[in-house]
Amino acid sequence: MTTWQIILVASAATLALKLAGYLVPAGFLERERPARIADLLTVALLAALIAVQTFGAGQALVVDARLPAVIVAAALYALRVPFVVVVFVAAGVAAGIRAFT
């Protein structure tokens, strides 16, 4: 398949999934189990995105200054520090590590 054929197939599949979403009855989505699955799926996808963006470089895994910054950010967030402070401290940790390496 060419790149354009793959793009067209992926676009059609995405459109089909979006249209299929309209066919799901509202009562089904209001039940406890599907709502919980949707909530957990959102968290899992966000965690996967963070992991890929933090540790991925092309097809390789990279451990650099981003790892300690994410660990510090997670710890500060767990301590309920304001988000702006979390971002600045994590950026400072990454910048400090990059300055010394």
Image (cartoon, rainbow, N blue to C red):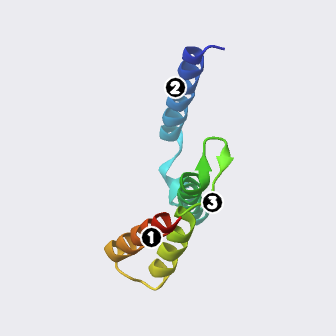
Tell me which numbered mark, 1 or 3, is placed earlier along the sequence: 3
Q: Going 35% across and 71% down the picture, which residue do you hit?
A: 88
Circles 2 and 3 in contact, beta carbons < 8 Å: no
- Given this view, does label 1 or label 3 mark the residue nearer the observer? 1
The spot of residue 27 in percent (x, y) is 51, 54
Depicted 72 relative to depicted 35: above or below: below
Which quadrant does the N terminus fall into? top right
Q: Secondary structure at mark 2?
A: helix
Q: Which residue is mark 2?
A: 11
Label 1 and label 2: CA atoms lie apart by 43 Å
Q: Residue furthest bottom?
A: 79
Q: Residues within 10 Å of mark 1 (few under 14, many from 20)?
A: few
Q: Amino acid at mark 3?
A: Val
What residue is shown with label 3? 63
**Residue 92 vs residue 10, the one in the foreground:** 92
Q: Which residue is mark 1?
A: 96
In three-dimensional space, the C-alpha distance between marks 2 and 3, rounded to whole angstroms, equals: 34 Å
Residue at position x 61%, y 41% in the image:
58
Percent coordinates x, y for residue 92 in the rendering: 40, 71
Residue 81 x/y as whole percent: 38, 82
Amino acid type at image mark 2: Ser
At mark 3, the secondary structure is: loop
Q: Nearer the viewer, mark 1 or mark 2?
A: 1
Quarter of the image for residue 77 reads bottom left
